[in-house]
Amino acid sequence: MQIEQLKPVIEAALLASTQPMTVHQLGDLFGETDEVSHELIARALEALSGDCHGRGVELKEVASGFRYQVRQEVHPWISRMWTERPSRYSRALLETLALIAYRQPITRPEIEQIRGVVVSSNIIKTMEEREWIRVVGHRDVPGKPALFGTTRAFLDYFNLKSLDQLPPLSEIRDMEDPQLRFEPEPLPARIVRDLPIDPDENHAPDEAGDGTAGPGHPAAADAADAADNHITAGAAEAPATSPESAGTGSASSPLDAIPTTTADEAANPAADVEADTAESDTEEYRA
């Protein structure tokens, strides 16, 4: 039988089958009198694959064999034929399935150790019902945990011929969605006042017992600044001394003529006025 005679038979068989078919299964369709070898079937399959160029379907080889399927380019339109929505799988299920695919055989405790969380029993049950994973053995450790591995149905579902066609882990990291990356934004600059070493200093209203603020009180700090400004202004307005007075030493320094004001007096000027008034009233009373 020639390839041109063989192609329609193989094409019809693949379309009529609900599962992919291997070369051996296709060879069983022919008798001894047809003289159809496996090599001839493979050449016919290659010719059928070439005939699909530019069409909406393609001949794809997966783990279970050959099958006709819709091309990815026209899938958005073909998917409207089915009213039910495609299944959406959780991130936990996909992570568990990826660990089984890349590190099989692997036990459930090992998956939990890598992910850092407990693997739900529903996830394992869902993958077993879809025949994506199966128990391939048991680990020789206390408890005899089951070893999980992928199946041919898993390869067929993801259009893979073997596990060697899985993308390397380096490519998976490059395919990571940049929107899922979390980059904290820098906080705006904020001016923070220096706090005293002793936190009780800010709460001491009168350390000296005379009604004045303590050294850590904000009013005392403002009064000290006012006193420094007053001294600086007085030094600027004081007249310069003559050389004679400077030589004899009898004249006082310009700073001596500046009235000294303490931080307490600057903070409480009203207290000084009241003290002077009280002294004058006492002298008048004695007179």
Image: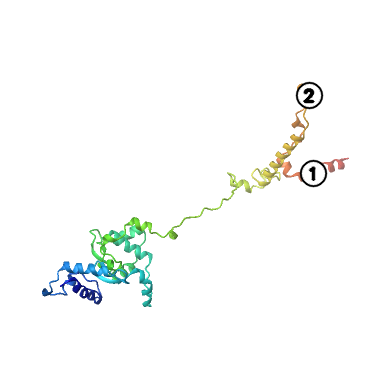
Distance (Cα) linking label 2 and label 1:
36 Å
- Sequence-wise first label, 2 or 1: 2
Residue at mark 2: 245
Give the quadrant of residue 134: bottom left
Q: Residue furthest top?
A: 248
Give the quadrant of residue 147: bottom left
Observer-nearest residue: 159 or 116?
159
Q: Classify 10 Å Cα crowding around label 1: few (below 14), some (14-19), many (20 and above).
A: few
Observer-nearest residue: 169 or 210?
169
Secondary structure of the residue carrying tag 2 is helix
Q: Residue furthest right?
A: 287
Secondary structure of the residue carrying tag 1 is helix
Mark 2: amino acid: Ser
Mark 1: amino acid: Val
Residue 190, given in percent of the width and then of the height, sits at 58, 50
Would residue 230 be found to the left or right of residue 49 on screen? right
Residue at mark 1: 273
